[in-house]
Structures are given as structure tokens and as C-alpha cells.
Amino acid sequence: MNLRYELVATDGQARRGRVHTSRGTYETPIFMPVGTRGAVVHLDARDYEQLGAEIILGNTYHLMLRPGADVVEHLGGLHKFTSWDGHTLTDSGGFQVMSLSPKIDDDGVTFKSIYDGTKTRLTPESATHIQEQLGADIAMVLDICAALPATKTEVRAAMETTHRWAGLAKAAHSRPDQAQFGIVQGGVDPDLRVESAAAISSLDFAGYGIGGLSVGEPRSEMLPALEAALSELPVDKPRYLMGVGDPISVVEAIALGVDQFDCVLPTRLARHGTVLNSNGKVNLRRAQFEHDLEPLDPRNPFSNRFSAGYLRHLLKVKEPTAGRVLTLHNLWYLLDLVNRTRTAIENGTLSEVRAEVAQYWT
């Protein structure tokens, strides 16, 4: 096994850990910024280093189409391609493909490229091979994320196909320096989540993603489904809740035992003028900030030298610098939040962080 999970501390079900890989180590809980096409929008590897990010995501679907997995491989794989020495993780492309109304069959999915409309196909084996070409440290298997709402029959069918594809992906994986994660599905049905987690765990992956949550369902349905999945996952492997990045969901999931998170939320919000702060979500375009001399957050080293009034001005005149500063601001906020949960778990005070976040986030 080219990945090992080390448990450092617990607080209830919450875990503070350290993951050892062929590249080095990363600390958990961890938030992983999303660099869809090879870069987090507005940022580059120098920014990731200054932020203290440890894992950056790449999007298999987009990279396989532009510039192509062969090109990335020729240019040295994702790390050399992006000049990033930290860890990388690539998704399988399954979530993006599902949004394109693909034709799904027993062996894979066929869809049209969003770039030029050409017919493209992904199978569990080809998604595995493409990610080996991309060279990420962690690669996800191809899965089917059933769009909600869906009937239990539809969710079960997607789940069972995901299980079968996971076995094919595991058999196809051959890169020894790359860890492969399986993915649990099952919608918001706790029984299906237990069944899926048990089936995927039996394949003995290096780690486990939990997909198909935070896709529009209320948190009151998401958290029980998540807890059910976690109950069947091995305690000695990383658990990764895919696509979740709102602060309260992150903290509540950490309390249940999740180790890893990713989401485009903080960067997408930043580009539209919304900032994440310890007192909640703030729309910087509001007129109240026009003459505001204070920084958005005195603690945030990526924005605290600028007044809110100045940043609002940059937004209003569509100056790209605004998107860059606010992206750094939002990512620092989430990275700092998970860092605080690590310390809180070690000190047995995670409940205090949960209460603080719940005051401002719903």
C-alpha cells in the first residue's frame, strides 16, 4: 500500500490525522482547493505555497480534453506541468460527465465535449489510465452520481454500477506511486449508504471518497447519510467527502469523522464578490461597503492590507485583481478553519468551534 493513515488524536468521532504517501505527508482534516484546468482560478503554485495548501485538485474530464492527458504526461505530469511540488488529486470525471446528459451503458459513459462537441467516452479502465498519465498522487475511480431527487430504484442502480466499475478500476490500476480511492454512493438513503460503503470497503482501496452528497439536498438529509457511510468505512484509511465546502457542513462532517474536503464554493463566491468571514458570508457589492476603511478580516493576511471600500471598487469596475484577492481571502478562511479544527481535536474542544461556526452559518 502506497498510502498510510496515521491517527494523531480524536475528539468524539472526529479524527486528527496524518497521511503518508509516496510524495510525503499531509495533515487532516484538510481542505483541498480545486484547480479544474490545471490552476485554481486567478492563482498559481506560488500562491498555494503561501496559503499553506497541501493538496490541489485537478479535473480529469477537463484535462483529458484540453490539453489532453498525453500532453500533460509529455510535459512531466501534473506536478511539473503546474510547477507544484505538493500533493495532487484528480477526480475521475464522473460528476462532470453526469451533468452533460451522457449515454450510460454497462461499460462506461459516452458524451459530447463541452469544447467542440466531439463524441468522447470514459470507462472505469480509461479513467484510471488517464489519471495515471496525469500523474496525480491520489486518483478517484469512475462512479455514477445519481442526480437528486431520484427514486430508490434509480439510486440503487447507479450505486450498483459504481460498485462494479470500482472493481474494474481497481484491476486496471497499475501505477505504484499513485494511491487509488474508491467512492461510496447511495443518495440520501442511510441503508444504501451502509451497503455501498461495505461493498467499496471490501475492495481494499487506499482511501475512500463519499460522493453524491451536497447536490441540493438539505443538510438534515445529508448528515445522516454521511454518518451511515462512515460507520462502514475502515478507520485506518482516509475518508473524503467530495464537493463540500460550506463552513458549517465542513465542521459538522469533521465531527462525524471526515478527513478531506474539496469544493469550488470559496473560489466561485470570490469571483462574484462574496467573502467568507468568521461572522458569516458577506456580499461585498453592497453599498454599505463603499466608504468602508476597514479590512474584510484583520486576521486574514491575504486581504487585511486593503480596505473593504477599495476591494468593492475593484469589483464594481470589473478589475481582475478583485477576484484574485478575494479568492486568496476565501481559501485562507477555509484552510484556517480546518487548521483550527485540527488543534481543537487535539485539545478536545471541537464542540467550541462547532458552536462558533453555527452562530453565523446555517
Image: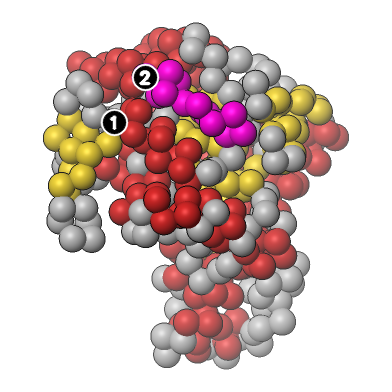
Q: Position of residue 66 (x, y in %)?
A: 34, 59
Q: Is residue 105 left or right of residue 75?
A: left
Q: Is residue 237 visible?
A: yes
Q: Is residue 10 visible?
A: no
SS category of the residue bearing label 2: helix
Q: Which mark is residue 288?
A: none
Disc 2: which residue: 168
Residue 31 position (above or below residue 47): above
Q: Residue at x 64, y 84 (%)?
A: 307
In three-dimensional space, the C-alpha distance between marks 2 and 1, rounded to whole angstroms, equals 9 Å
Q: Is residue 125 left or right of residue 312?
A: left
The amino acid on which the numbered mark 2 sits, given as a three-letter code, is Leu
Q: Position of residue 206 (x, y in %)?
A: 58, 23
Quarter of the image holding residue 184?
Answer: top left
Quarter of the image holding residue 318?
Answer: bottom left
Disc 1: which residue: 123
Q: Residue at x 15, y 56 (%)?
A: 117
**Disc nearer the start of the sequence (2/1):** 1
Q: Residues within 10 Å of mark 2 (few under 14, many from 20)?
A: some
Q: Are discs 2 and 1 less than 8 Å apart at CB?
A: yes
Q: Residues within 10 Å of mark 1 (few under 14, many from 20)?
A: many
Q: Position of residue 126 (x, y in %)?
A: 34, 34
Q: Is residue 172 magenta?
A: yes
Q: Which residues fall within the magenta stretch?
A: 168-181
Q: Residue at x 41, y 35 (%)?
A: 129
